[in-house]
Image (cartoon, rainbow, N blue to C red):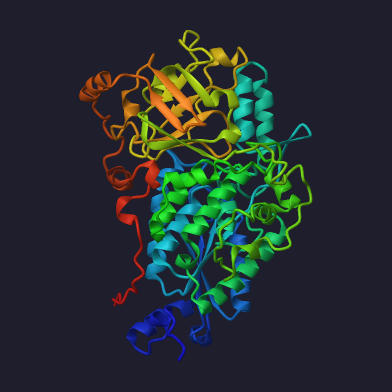
Amino acid sequence: MTKKRRSQHWYGKLDKDGFIHRSWMKNQGFPDHAFDGRPIIGICNTWSELTPCNSGLRDLAEGVKRGVWEAGGFPVEFPVMSLGETQMKPTAMLFRNLLAMDVEESIRAYGIDGVVLLGGCDKTTPGQLMGAASVDLPSIVVSSGPMLNGKYRGQDIGSGTDVWKFSEAVRAGEMTLQDFMNAESGMSRSAGVCMTMGTASTMASLVEAMGMSLPTNAALPAVDARRMALAHLTGKRIVEMVDEDLKPSDILTKEAFENAILANAAVGGSTNAVVHLLALAGRVGVDLTLKDFEIGSDIPLLVNCMPSGKYLMEDFCYAGGMPVVLNELKSFLRPARTVLNKDISAHYEGAECFNSDVIHSFNEPVKPAAGLRVLRGNLAPNGAIVKPSAATDELLETEAEAYVFENIEDLKANIDRDDLPVTPETILVLKGCGPKGYPGMPEVGNMPIPAKLVKEGVRDMIRISDARMSGTAFGTVILHVSPEAQAGGPLALVKTGDRIRVSASKGELELLVDEAELTARRAAWEPDAPHYTRGYAKLYIDHVLQADQGADLDFLVGKDTRLVTRESH
């Protein structure tokens, strides 16, 4: 006997409730046979003109629909909150959990059997996955894809990465403001996400490595016709997944997360992947901790893309994309099921590299042992992270005095002072930028180099904060210090002049102040008044978990797969 589809609890009933559900849908021109029991596929779309990275998703939705119809399904598109990383204040990360809630409740409330997640911009992909995982219907991702390579004066330039470089060059007097403004027009040349290996392209790469998308999803440019074809194939595949009852819980296993960690190291992926993977693991009940990220620490950097290399995502695509990377990692990858209902090995079978300077072999990497490092010590009892592939090697083993900025306003008001008492060896410390403190844990961890040092040619210093940084950024930046300052973590107690020891090789982050002094400082410390006292932001501040737990809301961890049985009329 064929199992009754979930959607039939909405559209299959021959009573008043069924009449209501079907008849109002028919005002869009759907015929009777569209409700004959075929799989109803939701297309969860984060398209928005305020999210430029996702501006091509309205077109890709049409490709998905073609594939769904071809496979005998019934596609229905619905919108959810869209998070424009470059447009939202105080930070899009504040709203990732709100998007996840929107996705979860939309999927739960509507009569659909499976869902295609259309995302791309940094927080949209993890937010959608978190929401879908908490309902656990068959789900698959189609990413918006990267922009075409940026161009300026005949050279390739990369989203974010070159913004930071050009900005520092202007501050140093090495680039005119007019040239800086001219570069702006050539940076973003098409629809799509950052064409560097920023957070968006990182998450698309990890989605592919975890088997939650079809192969080649990560790197195909947004405007490449092959991405539309991929959307069509994805629509076809989700109908098959519904028939197979292949759900996120079948795919997002501990092994899949370990494969994502390994892949993140190999592609030089964003530090933001840490908080997103931890949050997603919490939704599916996988025991993932910061310690698990250490399995990637010895994996070499294979992808020569900004910010850790010199090429861009368009080049990565033409060189062979993620299938080539996974093929290079095959002796490390764990067996894991994918949306193809096959092992992850099917995602890289027959992969061939077409440019060995863009995707290096495991034996001749861009950089050895380049995976994210987890640091712990009395300054970060619950952990902090650093990205060696984007750092200055000699700074990763340092002991020096700190200069402290109490908050982002303090930093902005003082970073360009000519009399700022810092040297190239000083460790810059920024407080108040964690999940609760900012709120939302913004991408300000890659603090500007003090102007007086920029003019001397300094381009990197150790910077420590409870913030995040853009996946497009670079430098010796220690991030996600947990617990954060606003939650009373030791970071709150650091004063200018304190000595700090950093050792990436030993995984250490120590504040060299005796315990008696720290006890006295702790007794005198008080948290800052919250920046928001109403609405979602207050809910977030009251319930957000710390970075080492993925910064999800405490009451959203886990899932609820129950069918809603109560009707609205």
Which residue does the image show at 41% across and 60% down from the upper left?
Answer: 284
Q: Is residue 420 above or below residue 141?
A: above
The residue shown at (26%, 30%) is 527
Residue furthest to the top = 419
Q: Quick one: quadrant of the N terminus?
A: bottom left
| In the displayed structure image, the side of residue 82 where residue 98 appears, left or right | left
* Among the 4 quarters of the image, the one containing residue 63: bottom right
Instruction: Answer left or right for 442 relative to 61.
Output: left
Q: Which image quadrant: the C terminus?
A: bottom left
- Which residue is outermost to the left? 523
Q: Which residue occupies 43% across, 19% down?
A: 413
Query: Hey, which quadrant is residue 305 in on the image?
Result: top right
Percent across and percent down for residue 471 are 55, 40
Locate residue 513 relative to residue 160 in the image: left or right: left
Instruction: Please name whichever residue, 417 or 454, is drawn nearer the observer in this view of the structure.
Output: 454
Q: How many marks?
A: 0
Horizontally, residue 80 falls left or right of residue 217, namely left
Q: Residue at x 30, y 19 (%)?
A: 514
Q: Is residue 194 above or below residue 352?
A: above
Residue lying at the far bottom of the rendered structure = 1
x, y percent for residue 357: 76, 42
